[in-house]
Structure formats: structure tokens, C-alpha cells
Amino acid sequence: MADDASIEIAHFDAELGAEIAPFGAILLRSESASSSQIENLTSSAKSIALAELGSRGKRNATEILANVRAMQAAIDLSDRLDKDAIVAMHDALLGAHYPNLVGGWRTDQVWIGGSGFGPHQSDFVAPHPERVAEAMDDLIRFVKRSDVPTLVHAALAHAQFETIHPFPDGNGRTGRALIHSMLRARGLTRNVAVPVSAGLLSDTRSYFDALNAFRSGDPGRIVTMLAEASFTAIVNGRQLVADLREARERWSDAITARRDSVVWRIADLLLRQPVIDAPTARRETGAPSANTARAIRQLADAGVITEFGNRKRDRLWQSTEVLSALDAFAERASRRR
């Protein structure tokens, strides 16, 4: 099953690697949102896009955006998976909101479930903090092995990471980022982050049960879980890409402009940043202010974007089609099997 899932992952990655559209950025955001939702952090695609523009109105959205940075760090650091790289992923995730929790391994006892007063009736008690450094050194040695099939390797490393629980908080999201780092390090993915968390999200109870089974000596269930999640995620990811392609084709019929114009550069931007303001459009396209303003008007007249917020200054526009596609992806991922 893991071999079949690996083949599907490689095919999906290759398909999108040949695309001009920025599907990599879209899938990375979608994967980060799904990973956050496993931790009960939910937000609409619009709120996440606004957070990317600097809005701090929705705390969940800013934390999901931090998870995007952690996922990106995991991919960027995949060529050197050591302690510093893992700590950097965790820092990208929590550094902005909880700076006192980052910078190294935990020094306190932690547990899952139960109450905040002690580990009584908890679901799992992580190793004593004095054992964390040695356990992580052992895990990092395992991560660097090259004689284990890639998806199996990533599943086992992820389960062991969650068992060690090396940080005070953010272990689940960092551990799922580690999966992507390993898939990239071993060359199974080269272009996109396959949204495996979206597959895990569809059956979180089985996911947590598989982690508990691993701790009881049964490694097979977490491997099976990650393989099944990969199949589910790829189906969902392909649907997202199809929805975005359809939107792009409709824009082609509505927009009358040269293919190398600022209008199309902003249209391409909307696929990865579905909420924009004029400064963002200007910065991302490199176009002068007048050309940017004219292109935004053309896109609005064509129905590609709509203005919202009724602002006289700092005006905002959104692509309803892209936002709807992203929210539909999240809704499909959250359906329980």
C-alpha cells in the first residue's frame, strides 16, 4: 500500500510540476490549514488570505499562516534534517505568537488529554524531559537513513516524533511538517506539498489510534494511515486543481488583454493570493501604480474580482471563485469517513 501511495504521490507531484499556474503555493496553504484543523484551529480561506496581507483580526488565521511558514521551512531545510532544522520549523510555527516556547527541546513534562493539573487520566504521557535530547538524537539518526522505503520512513519518523513530543506545544503541526521535509529530502516530491494532512483530517480518530498503536509496538497502522491519507489527499488535491483550472479558463473568456499584460500577471497572482490590495499587486507584478490600478479595474469589470469592505483607502479585492475552491477543499477534507 505504501508503494502504491508513493507512486501516486510522485505522479501527482510531476503533473503539477509541469503546470505554469502556482499550484504549489495553493497546496502548501491548503496542507497547512488541514494540519492546523487537526489541532482544532479552523479559519476560512478569506481570513487566511487577509492574514497574509497583514490583518491580525483573526487569531486562528494568523496561526495557520504561521503553519504555512513552518511547512515552507520544512521544505527549504529538507537537505539538512538535523536538530537545528527541526527547531527552525518549530520556531517558524510558534515564534511569533509564543516566543517563550521556541528555541530548543522542552524542559518540562507534557502529556496529551487529561487536565492541566497533572497527567492523571491522560491519553498519553510523553517521555521525561531528561530523555528528550537523546531520543531526538536517535530519531535524527533514523531520519538520515536511506535504506527504508520513503513513505514508510516518513510515517515511522513522524510517529516517533509525536511519541517523543520534543516541544512544549506545536508537536503535531511540526511533526506533520517533518513528513513533507522527508518526502522532499528523499526526492518523492520535488514540486508541491501533497496535502497529506487533508487525508488525515478525514479520520482523525483513526490517526490518533494509529499513533497509540505505534507506541504499543504496532508500526503497521501508522504506515497504513499515511498511505490511505495520501490517496485521499491526492483525490481532494486534484479536485482543487480542477476547480482552479476551470476558474482560470472562465477568466480567459472574460479578460481581453495581451497575455504578457499586467492584467494577466495579477490574474496569476490571484490563484495563490485570492485577496489583494493595490500595494500587493504592484509589488508582486513590478508594475507602476497607474498600470496596476488600470489592471485591477479591468479585472473588476470582467467579474474576476470584486471589491469588499467599503474602504475609501486601503481598498481590497477578492476572487470569489478561488476562495470558494479553497473552502470547498477544506470542507471535503473535514468530512469524516
Image (cartoon, helix red, strand yellow):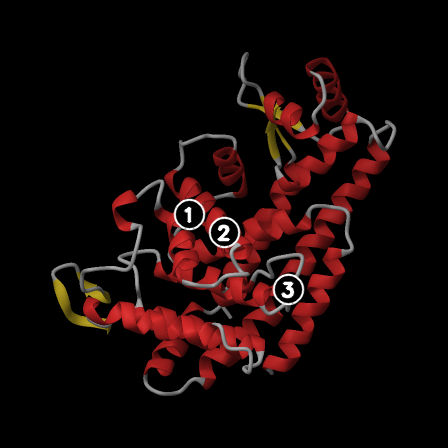
What residue sits 60% from the left and 27% below the top? 280
Give neighbour class at mark 3: few <14, some 14-19, many 20+ (Cα, 10 Å): many
The residue that disc 1 covers is 92
Mark 1 or mark 3, earlier in chain: 1
- Residue at image mark 2: 73
Is mark 2 in CB contact (under 8 Å) with mark 1? yes
SS for callout 1: helix
Return the residue found at the far left. 117
Q: Quadrant of residue 124?
A: bottom left
The quarter of the picture where the N terminus appears is: bottom right
Percent x, y of residue 62: 42, 40
* Measured Cα–Cα span from mark 2 to mark 3: 15 Å
Q: Amino acid at mark 3?
A: Thr
- Circle 2 SS class: helix
| Residue 297 visible in rendering | yes
Specify the amino acid type for callout 1: Ala
Asked whether the residues under the numbered discs 2 and 3 touch, taking CB atoms below 8 Å apart as contact, a structural biologist would say no
Which residue is found at the position 64% from the left and 75% from the top?
A: 6
Q: Is residue 154 above or below residue 54?
A: below
Q: Residue at x 55, y 49 (%)?
A: 29
Left or right position of 132 against 220: left
Q: Earlier in the sequence, mark 2 or mark 3?
A: 2
Q: Position of residue 115 (x, y in %)?
A: 17, 62
Residue type, label 2: Ala
In the image: residue 192, left or right of residue 291: left
Instruction: Indicate which disc residue 189 carries.
Output: 3
The x, y position of residue 109, in whole percent, is 18, 64
